[in-house]
């Protein structure tokens, strides 16, 4: 056994509402029908994955004041889908994204506790926050939250939920109480402690605040840093943060999201990857991606012509809503695009294709298996959350061709352990059972155990 | 002879049978007669109950729920229903979702998704959270109980008025996507036709919601909406907003009066479309003989340690005795009955195996034996999308002008 490589954690991200998802492919099925989710989940379970992952959005995206129509639009509600999937899977973890800004801790704690009971301990919650008034327009209190309070609310929200989950002693409910800057709640919970104690907590966010939030509260981080030195730096950084808060760094898993293309040979995979990138970035999508960066109307430009000569206007009125900003320094990013376009002689669309390509796993099954084992071995990550570009069959090539190789190498389980909780699959401990009657104040909860000095 | 019969159309099934589920059963003694009462927090427990009801051919099951702690605790009813949506194929699934501390935007997509998972079998039992204890779970203020007691008419009027607004928001969000909004037009690169997605721009005293929903229109268009209760605010809310109303008549002699009150309320508030379907809640214990039924009832009372009786009518007896009472409510003009089993562990199977065949033999009820959308099963008719309907009206007007 000592020769076995580190175990790889695998998640399966149901394709989402962005241009990674190729809806125009003839193999592309419904993003709404439950059968798509069932099929996707059952493929992941056949591949002995750790969990399935669902994203969330609470307002349809807009561009220039109109609903964005070029990518997949619409999705079913996260928690009901996961509850339905609990009924048609047996071992697979079920991870859902739920916003801490537009929900209340008691209700969310109750929903995840219910999912954990219904699935016999397979629930996970990806905690996200938003602060935009645009999304808030769908909610009764408007929901605008000052940007710098997003993680304060998220942290207090998670601590409130944990207090609620811990409030039963045995088969009896005890009173709970949680007071903080954002919440002042009390009462008795109507569910026993979830089978996992606490459902697994995910966090997805790259800022220093987001990383500290994860280091204090989360069991896993969903990140885009998936390769090379950058990935290793991110990995080392968040593990160190976890240690500073007095945690075993192994208790915080680093899981990059990553797309993949499998071919019979490396060369065939590269060819398929080039085709898929072209499908993902049509001329219209290329213009749109640049409009998001420029924050200007670029509809008059030819996708097959040169890059726009005008300068971006990042500080002008925002043309795009319902989407997080992806570039901190817009002018530097534009300069990079111009340089690549000039050096390689690429037109507008080609430049976008060349620079948008995310870090991907591309190659023969053996190559991809090796890349994954290597990344985990060299501490770039603890595993990956795979993002297929086809719904719902996109996971199949990975499951059929790469998974057997990972299993042969001893990097992935061949069978699920009987009755395993998601925490068991991920190698996470089960939080100790308190004596009930949880009461906590936010001020105490937020002080790190070790003071920070940097 | 009715017009439908004259045209050779088979008469729609007119009397319906549902089951109301609440933890271990409606008799509080049922809790003490289950070896491991913690079973109610497992999916298998709910699967057994729903599959028994489905095997019996019942129209639907409702799931009681509240945010706060009542009796012994309860899994989130909407998630139980979604779990069951993936495991059942015929029975209607009507979970309780509350409107006092929840967001209509979330409620709307939750139920739309249940409808997608269950292929059009979703319903909603609208409830409110009236207690101060529930307000505190959300850190919200509630008027002091000494000024506005939990069951006082002004307080209920306020809560149910808010719930009417919530139902209106939810219904508009269900219609915010037209059925053919998703076009996947490769030629123009458009996934949706944005002309068929609609902002709802709802501005009420309790909510303002922009829309559209993030979830496409549910298969039924409008899942079945129900209220339960007999207070004036409930009847008003149901008459203006719902498809079904469940009532517990304190005495059978008052049941006919209740129906009249409902019809009068519909008239006062100008209800349009199909009349509200009113169901009588009937607490039942069914055995193969009246003696065995009485014996089991006595066991429940003993387990509970005190006598218990429901707010509405109770029948503990043989299938024939229970069927006699069901027939009375049919004659009174109710759309159906919702059976509240005294003890789930036994009564789900005795209803399915003893009572339903008796009702079928008397041609009171026709068991469901094929998958069908819940609206259709209950004879509620299609729910046209308000936006599509407007468009058709608009088109018709243009044609009229041209002529």
Image (spheres, coloured by chain):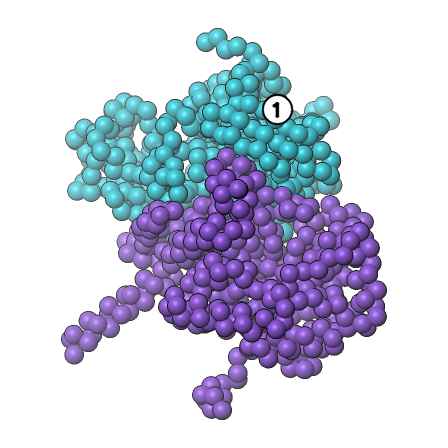
Chain colours: A cyan, B purple
Quadrant in the picture for residue B89: bottom right
Task: Say which residue appears at 29% left-offset and 65% top-offset.
Answer: B390
Pointer 1 local density, CA inside 10 Å: few below 14, some 14–19, many at least 20:
some
Residue A214 visible? The answer is no
Residue B160 visible? The answer is yes
Q: Which residue is mark 1?
A: A251
Task: Say which residue appears at 33% left-offset and 39% top-offset.
Answer: A134
Image quarter (top left, top right, bottom left or bottom right) of the C terminus of chain B = bottom left
Q: Nearer the viewer, residue A347 or B55?
A: B55
| Chain letter of disc 1 in the image | A
Quadrant in the picture for residue A48: top right
**Element on which disc 1 rests:** helix
Q: Looking at the picture, how far across and down is residue B201, in whole percent?
A: 31, 50
Q: Nearer the viewer, residue B234 or B69?
A: B234
> Is residue A252 left or right of A308 when viewed as pictured?
right
Q: Residue furthest top?
A: A453
Task: Say which residue appears at 74% left-offset and 65% top-offset.
Answer: B285
Above or below for A223 versus A188? above
């Amino acid at each position: 056994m000592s020769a076995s490589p580190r175990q790889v954690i695998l998640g399966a991200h149901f394709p989402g509402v962005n241009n990674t998802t190729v809806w125009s492919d003839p193999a592309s099925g419904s993003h709404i029908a439950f059968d798509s989710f069932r099929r996707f989940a059952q493929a992941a379970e056949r591949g002995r994955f750790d969990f399935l992952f669902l994203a969330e959005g609470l307002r349809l995206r807009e561009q220039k004041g109109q609903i964005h129509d070029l990518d997949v639009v619409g999705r079913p509600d996260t928690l009901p889908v996961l509850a339905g999937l609990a009924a048609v899977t047996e071992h697979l973890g079920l991870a859902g994204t739920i916003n801490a800004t537009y929900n209340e801790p008691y209700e969310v704690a109750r929903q995840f506790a219910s999912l954990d009971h219904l699935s016999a301990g397979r629930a996970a919650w990806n905690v996200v926050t938003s602060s935009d008034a645009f999304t808030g327009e769908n909610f009764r209190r408007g929901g605008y939250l000052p940007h710098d309070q997003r993680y304060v609310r998220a942290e207090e929200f998670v601590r409130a939920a944990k207090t609620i989950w811990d409030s039963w002693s045995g088969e009896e409910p005890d009173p709970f109480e949680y007071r903080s800057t954002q919440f002042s709640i009390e009462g008795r919970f109507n569910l026993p402690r979830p089978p996992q104690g606490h459902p697994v907590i995910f966090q997805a966010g790259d800022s220093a605040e987001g990383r500290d939030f994860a280091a204090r509260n989360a069991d896993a981080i969903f990140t885009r840093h998936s390769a090379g030195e950058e990935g290793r730096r991110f990995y080392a950084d968040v593990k160190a943060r976890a240690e500073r808060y007095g945690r075993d760094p192994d208790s915080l898993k680093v899981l990059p999201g990553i797309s993949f293309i499998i071919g019979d040979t490396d060369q065939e995979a590269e060819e398929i990857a080039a085709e898929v990138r072209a499908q993902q970035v049509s001329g219209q999508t290329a213009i749109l991606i640049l409009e998001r960066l420029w924050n200007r109307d670029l509809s008059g430009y030819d996708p097959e012509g040169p890059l726009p000569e005008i300068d971006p206007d990042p500080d002008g009125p925002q043309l795009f809503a319902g989407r997080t900003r992806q570039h901190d320094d817009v002018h530097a990013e534009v300069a990079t695009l111009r340089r690549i376009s000039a050096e390689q002689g690429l037109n507008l669309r080609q430049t976008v294709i060349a620079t948008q390509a995310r870090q991907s796993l591309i190659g023969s099954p053996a190559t991809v298996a090796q890349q994954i084992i290597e990344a985990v071995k060299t501490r770039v990550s603890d595993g990956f959350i795979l993002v297929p570009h086809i719904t719902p069959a996109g996971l199949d090539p990975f499951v059929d061709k790469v998974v057997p190789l990972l299993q042969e190498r001893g990097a992935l389980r061949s069978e699920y352990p009987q009755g395993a909780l998601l925490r068991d699959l991920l190698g996470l401990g089960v939080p100790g059972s308190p004596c009930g009657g949880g009461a906590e104040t936010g001020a105490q909860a937020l002080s790190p155990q070790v003071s920070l000095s940097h | 002879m009715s017009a439908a019969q004259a045209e050779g159309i088979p008469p729609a099934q007119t009397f319906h049978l549902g089951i109301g589920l609440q933890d271990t059963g409606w008799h509080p003694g049922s809790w003490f007669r289950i070896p491991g009462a913690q079973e109610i927090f497992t999916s298998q427990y709910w699967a057994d109950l729903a599959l028994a009801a489905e095997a019996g051919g019942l129209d639907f099951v409702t799931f009681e729920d509240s945010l706060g702690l009542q009796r012994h605790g309860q899994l989130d009813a909407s998630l139980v229903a979604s779990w069951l949506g993936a495991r059942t194929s015929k029975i209607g699934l009507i979970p309780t979702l509350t409107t006092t501390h929840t967001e209509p935007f979330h409620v709307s997509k939750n139920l739309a998704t249940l409808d997608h998972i269950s292929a059009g079998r979703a319903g909603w039992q609208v409830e409110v959270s009236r207690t101060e204890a529930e307000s505190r779970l959300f850190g919200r203020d509630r008027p002091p109980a000494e000024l506005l007691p939990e069951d006082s008419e002004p307080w209920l009027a306020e809560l149910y008025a808010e719930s009417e607004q919530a139902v209106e928001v939810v219904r508009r969000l269900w219609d915010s996507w037209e059925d053919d909004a998703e076009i996947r037009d490769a030629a123009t690169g458009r996934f949706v036709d944005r002309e068929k997605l609609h902002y709802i721009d709802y501005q009420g005293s309790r909510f303002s919601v922009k829309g559209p929903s993030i979830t496409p229109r549910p298969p039924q268009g409008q899942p079945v909406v129900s209220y339960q209760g007999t207070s004036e605010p409930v009847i008003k809310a149901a008459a203006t907003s719902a498809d079904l109303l469940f009532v517990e008549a304190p005495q059978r002699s008052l049941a006919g009066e209740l129906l009249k009150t409902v019809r009068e309320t519909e008239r006062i508030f100008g209800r349009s479309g199909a009349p509200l379907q009113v169901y009588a809640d009937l607490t039942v214990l069914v055995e193969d003989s009246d003696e065995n039924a009485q014996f089991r009832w006595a066991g429940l009372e003993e387990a509970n340690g005190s006598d218990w009786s429901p707010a509405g009518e109770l029948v503990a007896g043989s299938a024939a005795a229970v069927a006699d009472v069901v027939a009375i409510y049919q004659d009174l003009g109710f759309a159906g009955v919702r059976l509240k089993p005294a003890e789930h562990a036994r009564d789900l199977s005795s209803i399915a195996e003893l009572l339903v065949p008796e009702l079928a033999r008397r041609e009171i009820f026709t068991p469901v034996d094929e998958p069908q959308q819940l609206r259709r099963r209950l004879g509620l008719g299609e729910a046209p999308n308000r936006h599509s309907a407007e468009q058709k009206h608009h088109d018709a007007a243009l044609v009229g002008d041209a002529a």
